[in-house]
Image: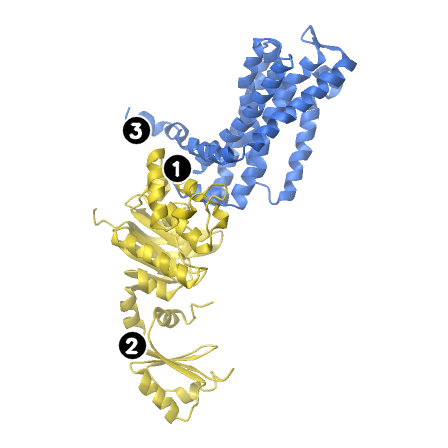
Chain colours: A yellow, B blue
Amino acid sequence: MSDSPVILAHSLVKRFGSFEAVKGIDLEVSPGESFGFLGPNGAGKSSTMRMIAGVSPVTEGVLRIFGLDPAVAGSAIRNRLGVVPQADNLDGELTPLDNLVIYGRYFDIPRSECVERARELLEFVQLTDRSGGRVDALSGGMKRRLTIARGLMNRPEMLLLDEPTTGLDPQARHILWDRLYRLKQQGVTLVLTTHYMDEAEQLCDRLVVMDAGRIVAEGSPRDLITNYSTREVLELRFSAGQNAQHEAQLTGLGERLEVLADRVLVYTEDGESALREVHTRGMRPESSLVRRSSLEDVFLRLTGRSLAE
Amino acid sequence: MSRDTLIWRIAPPILRNAHRPQRIVERNAIVYRRTPMVFISGFFEPLFYLLSFRIGFGALIGDVEFAGMSIEYAKFVAPALMASSAMNGAVYDSTMNIYFKLRYSKTYDAMLASPLGAPDVAIGEILWAMLRGFIYSLSFLACLVVLGLAGSWWILAALPACLLIGLAFAAVGMALTTYMRSWADFDWVQTIMLPLFLFSATFYPLSAYGDFGWIVQLSPLYHGAALVRGASLGVATWGMLVHVLVLIVLAVVGLTVATRRIETLLLK
């Protein structure tokens, strides 16, 4: 496999009428990498993903996938891609097995080969016992796994996942992460969007933080935390509506303060000593928590907004 | 011949990728293998019509004049009903089914994420709807033979005409469906289909319409029915080329519009 980038974007813009969803972004993703787009809804993640997937025309700028231009080689690009969309679009008129088989046929894979691959993949996503049933009878997590299996029918060089675990319960998320991690180990390039920090930290070698159509930071999860946050965070909760009142009293504590609706965050190298100082200053928070810094803190720092909706 | 040679590069994509729409047909065939009822209903519908004309009207009306021949009324009506069966099958499939896949089940979004493109989806769905209409036509033909209304071997020449009718109506049906905004819009399909069925020189010759004959000629089914009737009665005229041309134009326009609309709706 060559090391030329699988995704190369330069000043990439997507407009819908007068609305600019993607406002000139630059990207480079190497083969085998796990790359993430982190951002809230409406940040431009899905629009970018659709352009990469060759199902949405580029408005302006340069985009190359496997070195090919999606405007002229869309079909050839899609032939080498696996796509797991945000909303499940499984074929409800077909069984899970037939969903995979016919999807392989769209790639011109011989029928017997399709059946063989479909059985292997149903095994991989732990759905073998559901292969002949109805798609509608599957749970949300099972549908997402089946969609991933479908995206793997053509043995793609790159798998695009748009918010793969949104709406799934914790157990289903962990099963999914495990499967994605195995794919990553097999050398499949993973490109995913998410608004979950833990997902980005678990799966991504490198990520970009997007906000309002722009890339506002780029790096590995650890780099981003080191560069944009402190080692620890002290979370304080005061009685309802009193967070802002305590802001003045907290001044000078830690490196930085963030007052949110439900809590106050104190960014510091040493959370425990900051908490002692809070008590020394005579404040009595209802609860307190010292934790390691996360990507959420990075996001808050960069955009001034919380990721959680 | 290599796919990189000049002829392949300048050939329209429709020729280079002729195998792709077949995948859509294949998908639909798998779905219908599980729900054969639609084909059975397609068999009974024309049978009941035929019986009613054979038993009732035929006796009342007697023979009719067509192209200088005097023919039994049932034999006059049967080809037009056969043309209608091709239309019905194609329209049923290209309206409701396609609307569901386009707006609700997102089936086309999934297809378009594969190497298939908008023209492949449109061609594939239209071909399938045409085939469904054709299956209706075939079962209708079987009824004709059993009831002794087939006339001569010429009736086989009506089959390609039925394919053309199915193609034209499937293409136009799909194109119109892409503009529908709710299930209520499908009332229009019935509102259009019923007069087409009744007033396409289906039940009496064009001459019976008097001064309003030109309105009848605006109906695509009129052209289809005229082709099937001519073929089944063994009457070939130059005017039939016009009928063929009308149906081909409808198919091309329908396909073009359907493709563009899929691009506008799903590849934005």
Chain bearing tag 2 is A
Using residue B50 as the reference point, say whether residue A164 is left or right of it: left
Asked whether the residues under marks 1 and 3 belong to the same chain, the reply is no
Proximity of marks 1 and 2: CB atoms separated by less than 8 Å: no
Residue A165 in the image: state x and y as whole percent. 41, 58
At 58% from the left and 36% from the top, the residue drawn is B95
Q: Which residue is mark 1?
A: A106
**Vertical position of residue A49 compared to residue B108: above or below:** below
Most distant residue in the right direction: B60
* Between discs 1 and 2, the one toward the N terminus: 1
For mark 3, what is the residue? Answer: B3
Same chain for the residues under marks 1 and 2 in the image: yes
Residue shown at the point (58%, 32%) measured from the top left: B38
Q: Quadrant of the N terminus of chain B?
A: top left
Q: CA distance from mark 1 to mark 2?
A: 50 Å
Q: Is residue B109 above or below residue B239?
A: below
- Bin the neighbour count of mark 1 within 10 Å (Cα to Cα): few under 14, some 14-19, many 20 and up: many
For the residue marked with disc 2, what is the amino acid? Arg
Q: Nearer the viewer, residue A111 or A290?
A: A111
The amino acid marked with disc number 1 is Tyr
Residue at mark 2 = A231
Badge 2: residue crowd in 10 Å (few <14, some 14–19, many ≥20): some
- Answer with the quarter of the image where residue B7 lies: top left
Locate residue B240, reporting x and y percent. 58, 14
Query: For the residue marked with disc 3, what is the amino acid?
Result: Arg
